[in-house]
Image: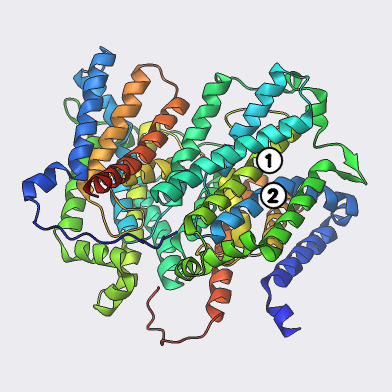
Amino acid sequence: MKHLLKSREIWLFLALVAVVICTTFRSPAFGSLNNLLGIFNNSSMLIILALGQMVVIITRSIDLSMAANLALSGMCVALINAAYPEISVPVLVCIAMACGTILGAFNGLLIWKLGIPSIVVTLGTLTIYRGVIFLIAGGKWVNADQLSPAFIQGTRLDFLGLPLLSWCAIAITLAFFVMMTRTAPGRSIYAVGVNPTASVYAGIDLGKTVFTAFCISGLVSGLCGYLWVSRYVIGSVEVAKGYELSIIAACVIGGVSIAGGIGTVVGTVLGALFLGLVNSALPVINISPFWQMAISGAAIILAVVFNARSERRQGRIILKNTGSDP
Amino acid sequence: MTKVPLTTRQIPDRLTHPFQSALFSWQSLLLLVAVMIFIVNCFATPYFLSPWSLSDATFNFTEKALIALAMALVIISGEIDLSVAAIIAFASTMMGLALQFGVGTPGLVAVGILTGLICGAFNGVLVTGLGLPSIVVTIGTMSFFRGLSFIVLGDQAYKGYPTSFAFFGQGYVWWVISFEFVLFLIMAVLFYILLHRTNFGRWIFVIGNNPIAAEFSGVRVRRIKLVLFCLTGIMSGVAAVLLTSRLGSTRPSIAQGWELEVITMVVLGGVSILGGAGSIIGVVLAAFIMGLVTFGLGLLNVPGIVMSIVIGGLLIAVIALPILAKRLQQRNIK
């Protein structure tokens, strides 16, 4: 029980419940199951992307190119759908995921084979991928009337009372949970983040693990590329611009340590839900949407302070702290 | 983000001549690239080689380059500041707000720079006082500062800055030499002296290479990092004054995405993103390279988004090429 109370996920969950209850006092409709499911549906893509980013951050890297990857993969399938409407949606989803994985693997290869820091590589590919969207689309947008009805319906179809988009997020969350806690690759991702040197001695290939992490983040970015275009029915250069920071914010709020090695699937999902919930609660309590940015910024800063405090408590103090930051 | 280096260290059997090492240094490579781009530009478009268009070209990068000078010091010390563009937005908003209360030109400049300093100090206190990782802190303050601008301005804009205020971003000191450019050159010299000719500059390198050893050697690690964050804030404030004066208006979306361009400039200039190495000359050359590339492509009617491919590719290529070259060299030795 004591252990449970100390865990970050419980506190984050309580914070979520508190936000829901407070907002429901203001507007009773907010707490209804329908509205909450709607918020979950709206946060689905953030959840999926944050899980991909979590894997990368746990290996002590960072992927700033996820949103650009999403936009490029999305544009690819949008263009294919506009040109060949007869290609079925599952095939397009596979194409989007393949496209995303290739882009992620490109990041991973540069980091693995050349040893360039991930922040530099993904900073570069972030602008490159955005530029490539402009080139392949010739500067044009793909609009609703160019997309096939099946393509647009892909995220909206109802299955057991939930849209497919929500089921997507649930399935991916389960897959990540199993991978990170029950499989060897998932454990080696943690190992590389906690102690790279020790994991090399344990026989884990450092570079390959980081490469795998980037392939995973690329894969989910590609999947979200299709989901985004299908949901918002637009393919353009501007799709998901600046979203990379929301993704990182969700991870940080969810307790993923930017120094690597720490982070859970449940925490990350709650972090993404927290951002989604706050964003949809603001208009209800009559706060102008212009406050959104500052509030999510403040949430990130608070989360980092919280993270640092909980991380410091772990482990034994072998040498006395001299007050220096390590 | 740090990787464990598994390479063996090679000890040379003789020292290289200083002239030879200068010839193959990062700066000379950058200089070569800059000269090549200049020459290509001259041939590519007839409009490039005139004093006035070259003067226009400097406006493209001086504001970013001013921040890059301070950012270089922060990155050398092993930290990073992603909030610089948001500080510009917030400082510009504060200047606009001061304008509504009838503050004159000197007051506006003071408000801009002071806001930058406060924002920088806020970052610095979070990073050094609470010991938080700077990359996440500044991702947070990045949306916090810009968010404050959005709260103040919403979808509105501040306009009607006094004409005397326009000098900073639009004025010329002598013939085609703009005030912005002169300020950049002066600042570059000052930062060069600070980083390469003072104890303070040496300490920055020491901290970047090994903060714990620095602490044990009596270097005040936290205080120096705090100063560096304040310095970056001040330079962002200065850039905000210049940019607001040049545009003549303030919107919350001002300078969006600049943080990435500033960091690209710094890394292109040979500053190690892991800290501990870099030079101001490299950063200045990188600023010129980025300015010349974007201006030359602009004259050729290349859209801005395509330019970003070139900048992104340049960033990766310039870092990857020396690594590949070294690897080839080692293979030949074996």
Residue most toward the right? A160
Q: Is residue B2 above or below residue A280?
A: below
Residue A241 in view of the camera: no
- Front position in the image: A207 or B69: A207
Q: Position of residue B58 (x, y in %)?
A: 27, 31
Q: Chain of mark 1?
A: A
User: In front: B298, or B34?
Assistant: B34
Quarter holding the N terminus of chain A?
A: bottom right
Considering the numbered disc 2 on the image, is that residue within a helix, a strand or a loop?
Answer: helix
Rendered location of residue A111, percent (x, y): 45, 49
Q: Indicate left or right for B77 with A16 as reference.
A: left
Residue type pointed to by label 1: Cys
- Which residue lies under the disc numbered 2? A48
Q: Nearer the viewer, residue B275 or B57?
A: B275
Tag 2: amino acid: Ile
Tell me the element at label 1: helix
Considering every residue shown, the one lying at the far top of the view is: B46
| Residue positioned 60% across, 41% down in the render | A101
In the image, residue A313 lies at what x, y percent? 56, 80
Residue A271 visible at all: yes
Q: In percent of the image, x 72 and y 23: which residue is there?
A: A81
Q: Which mark is residue B56?
A: none
User: Does the CB distance between marks 1 and 2 fall below 8 Å?
Assistant: yes
For the C terminus of chain A, the image quarter is bottom left
Tag 1: Cα neighbours inside 10 Å, few (<14), some, or many (≥20)? Answer: many
The chain letter for the residue carrying disc 2 is A
Q: Which residue is mark 1?
A: A224
Residue A206 x/y as whole percent: 48, 59
Residue at horizontal 82 percent and vertical 27 percent from the top: A150
